Image (cartoon, helix red, strand yellow):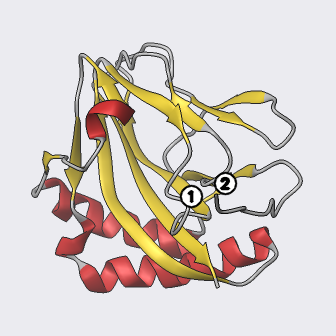
Amino acid sequence: MIEIPQCTPIGFEKIKVPTETWDLIQEVYPLLKRYEQIEYFSGKEYFIQGTGNSTIFPIDKVPHQRDIIHKQLHKLHQDWAGREIEPSYVYGIRSYKNGTVLKMHTDIIQTHHIASIISVDKDINNLEDWGLNIIDHSGTEHIIYLEPGEMILYESAICKHGRPESFKGNFYNNLFVHYKFK
């Protein structure tokens, strides 16, 4: 088994998305929405459950902007983690739909050491918000709520996280950015 060191005292932190990056995300978001497709990946049926589904707005449609976002956020993630990291992956914007449940899990241990979830857009239909449950390094579970333009930095390979409550709104759209240790 691979041992992953803890990098921060708690394992996560909620912050505002840097303005430069947020502006770029807002610029590409309307374009990416045109390419919305059902999301498929190995094991999806285990992680994303419930009566809803998820779609993806593939950021690979704009590779130059994807790479800029990854580069812009690199130093922020590296400083937060307190160690050298390198870019590994930027997922497209995942759109969770009504009835979706995201099982508690940790991310891919080889490539997802340090990550962030960026809230891009949501329509909760005037119902209760859909929090991210995350377990910190001491074993305490927290529920974090995000507004568009906010993000969670987290140690995604070792901090168990998910959204175990069924989503009751229309959509909840997040961008995921990942880095691995050098």
Residue 144 spot, x, y in % from top left: 65, 34
- Label 1: which secondary element: strand
Relative vertical location of residue 175 with respect to residue 164 in this rendering, above or below: below
**Amino acid under label 1?**
Ser
Residue placed at 56% from the left, 45% from the top? 106
Left or right of 76, for residue 41:
left
Pointers 2 and 1 in contact (C-beta within 8 Å): yes
Q: CA distance from mark 2 to mark 1?
A: 6 Å
Question: Which residue is more in the foreground, 53 or 40?
Answer: 40
Rendered image quadrant of residue 161: top right
Residue placed at 74% from the left, 51% from the top? 13
**Amino acid under label 2?**
Tyr
Residue placed at 73% from the left, 29% from the top? 142
Answer with mark 2 or mark 1, whichever residue precedes in sequence.
Answer: 1
Assess disc 1: are there few (<14), some (14-19) or many (≥20) residues with their C-alpha within 10 Å of its C-alpha. many
- Which residue is tagged 2? 154
Left or right of 55, for residue 93:
right
Residue 177 spot, x, y in % from top left: 48, 64
Rendered image quadrant of residue 75: bottom right
What is the quadrant of the C terminus in the image? bottom right
Relative vertical location of residue 173 with respect to residue 85 in this rendering, above or below: above
Residue 12 spot, x, y in % from top left: 73, 50
Residue 35 spot, x, y in % from top left: 10, 58
Rendered image quadrant of residue 114: bottom right
Disc number placed over residue 128 in the picture, else none:
none
Q: Which residue ends up furthest to the front in the rendered image?
A: 1
Disc number placed over residue 116 in the picture, else none:
1
What is the quadrant of the N terminus in the image? bottom right
